[in-house]
Amino acid sequence: MSTRKIIHLDLDAFFCAVEELRNPSLIGKPFAVGGRPETRGVVASCSYPARRLGIHSAMPMSQALRLCPTLIIVPARHREYAAMSQRVMAILRRVTPLVEQISIDEAFLDVTNQPGDVAALAGELQHAIHSELGLPASLGVATNKLVAKIANNVGKAAVRGDAPPRALLIVPPGEEAAFLAPLPADALWGVGPKTAERLRALGIHTIGDIARWPERDLVRRFGKHGQELSLHARGLDDRPVVIEHERKSISQETTFVRDITDAALLRQTLLEQTEDVAAALRQRQLMATTVKLKIRWADFTTVTRQITLPQPTDEAATFYAIACTLFDRVWEGQAVRLIGVGVSGLSEARQLSLWDAPDERAERLYTAIRELRKRYGEQAIRRGGELGNIDAGCDD
């Protein structure tokens, strides 16, 4: 069996990079894409000069302005970002059909069967995206998804300055565990603040410490999660790259830097996520029937709720209204660590024919809304104007 060659690609500050193409005067300046502070908007993405000042995505825009009073605020343009994302993914598929897009600006590629050196191939991809589209991208290369993703994170973190990192870091086969060993324990997937705290209490501070700890004891203390920690700490991950037509769901999740109790920020995040999910569906020419909300509280308890529509749709407004309905049912002011929206029950979008006018599509949507209101109450679906003036957007 041949050694796998996996590439993780992440577009650097994608929303900002697209805005700089439209307006080159933004280059080198602290600016943020997102909503206005007077509408309780949040930062969807920010330029690297803004990041050096402590500004980050999901931060309230009012707080970002306090950190940088001269911060330039640019409204999000989701259709343009989705269109540009589609062009990036087309470049990736010129190399291999084994592309797993995991967000609007991030993807895994399996290039195991591609001839030549994987490092050279990754460099060519990075160059093609920059030369053809003007977008900076960072890449991590390894024998599995876990290590490739962490390699990308490490590569980007090592680059300093106000320019996009455009990092490229390769972990050679057989060196996965050695690469991971000196990294802090919370750099590993599945190690959040609570788990990191429990590990520190055991004297475990690095990924290498986890790898050296007896797996049986980790399982005793953390259950099945303990076995995953042990395997991942040794650089072992056999998950395949899942190509689009094999996917049974599409989702977006946000893990906050700090736990959130602000309802407006949580709803704003849901709005951004449903916009991205809807864009991903349209990009794949798919529709969905089930909308799922996922929330993780500060104590790592995870709650999921879902509603199934009577008819499939790709409408972001419908997804957002359902997500808010589910959110209202489960949230009672608790601190939220993670929130996410997913859709499933995917089917190919039906193209409008000469005999299927746009009004008929609208009527199908209204029928779905009426069914939702009948099952879940009149407040299940509301007009956008009733939800307040909220700006959407999220990348990083």
Image (spheres, rainbow, N blue to C red):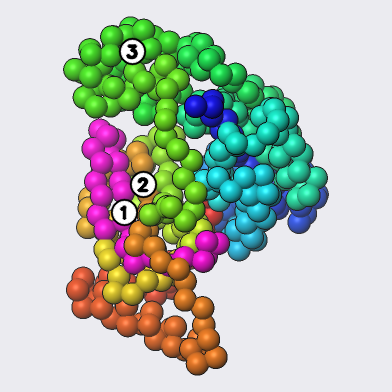
Circle 2: element type: strand
Quarter of the image for residue 110 reads top right
Q: Residue at x 19, y 73 (%)?
A: 375
Q: Mark 3 points at which residue?
A: 200
Relative to 360, is 8 above or below? above
Q: Name the residue under label 2.
A: 339
Look at label 3 and name its amino acid. Arg
Residue 188 appearing in the image: yes
Circle 3: element type: helix
> Going by the image, does 383 lie left or right of 1?
left
Q: Distance between the residues labelled 1 and 2?
A: 8 Å
In the image as oriented, which residue stretches furthest toward the front? 1
Label whose residue precedes the other's in the sequence (3 or 2) = 3
Look at label 2 and name its amino acid. Ile
- Residue 102, image x, y percentages: 50, 46
Label whose residue precedes the other's in the sequence (1 or 2) = 1
Tell whether label 2 touches label 1 (CB within 8 Å): yes
Q: In which quarter of the image is the C terminus?
A: top right
Q: Residue at x 53, y 86 (%)?
A: 353
Q: Residue at x 39, y 54 (%)?
A: 249
The stretch in magenta equals 282-306
Q: How far apart are marks 3 and 1 (CA)?
A: 32 Å
Q: Mark 1 points at which residue?
A: 293
Q: How far apart are marks 3 and 2 (CA)?
A: 26 Å
